[in-house]
Image (tube, grey):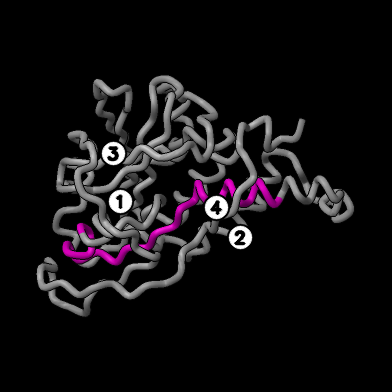
Amino acid sequence: MSFLNKLGIGIGTGTSREMTRPAPSSNRHRTPGMPAAAVGTARAPEMHEPTRISNGLKEFLWNLDGLGRGSLLDLGPAWQTTLSFFIERGFRVSSEDILRGWKAFLGEEEARLRDESGLRDGLDMTPNGRAARFLDENLKYTRSSFDAILLWDLLDYLEPAMAKQTVSCLTELLRPGGVVFAMFHSKKPEGFQRYRVADSNTLQVISTPVMCPAQKVYQNREIQDLFGRYRTMKSFVSRDQLRETLFIK
């Protein structure tokens, strides 16, 4: 059985990075200046999605208050509602759907194994080797590029080796004092959801077909180990079996 099938992931297409798109201007920036720019193709907003109160998002925004023209990396789909929310607050937003890119990458790796080109090229096909190869081609930003990162529940769906290397990579991209907003399931989720920012303490919840099955349920100690280089960690436990956690570098 291939490693792709072991992960429960069907082969599909997708890109890890969207095309660059200019952001709309806003007259509600905290500080004057040029209009903020967004990277990523914005998806059309959808109305009437279920919502959940997010104390983690509220705390995330409180930590960013007064920052002025900051920069934010959104590791989910480029939803127009989320882009607009942060752009109107003076942020330059970059969007990179890492989970979609990871699925596409695993499909390419599977194809390499089938035709044995990966073996001929001497590629490291271990989990650590795959993770290093993926990150070498994605998240191509300079060090200390961002003040904030929306990680969502991404880590639950990545192989543990990939999750560990992803956190290490993101830590390098975050400026000192920067904030990460992450979510963790307290048990393996039955479905698959994406999230959009509706307002300062509300998230829209979008149920979608499973892209990648959950790989691991992280305990508190494991989360602390993953983010060991961060000076502050604060968690909010909700009734829907999601823990929202902030990490401050």
Name the secondary structure under disc 3.
strand
- Which residue carries the number 2 mark? 137
Q: Between disc 2 and disc 3, whose residue precedes?
A: 2
Q: Is residue 126 magenta?
A: no
State how far apart marks 2 and 3 are (Cα). Answer: 30 Å
Q: Amino acid at mark 3?
A: Val
Q: Amino acid at mark 1?
A: Gly
State how far apart marks 3 and 1 are (Cα). Answer: 29 Å
Badge 1 vs badge 4, beta-carbon distance below 8 Å: no
Badge 4 vs badge 2, beta-carbon distance below 8 Å: no
Name the secondary structure under disc 1.
strand
Residue 10, position as x, y percentages in the image? 62, 40
- Which residue carries the number 1 mark? 177
State how far apart marks 2 and 1 are (Cα). Answer: 27 Å
**Relative to residue 38, is residue 217 depicted above or below?**
above
Query: Residue at coordinates 58% horizontally, 41% vertically from top-left?
Result: 162
Instruction: Determine whether, in the image, residue 89 is placed left or right of residue 182.
Output: left
Q: Between disc 4 and disc 2, whose residue precedes?
A: 4
Q: Amino acid at mark 2?
A: Glu
- Which residue carries the number 3 mark? 205
Q: Between disc 3 and disc 1, whose residue precedes?
A: 1
**Relative to residue 97, is residue 218 depicted above or below?**
above
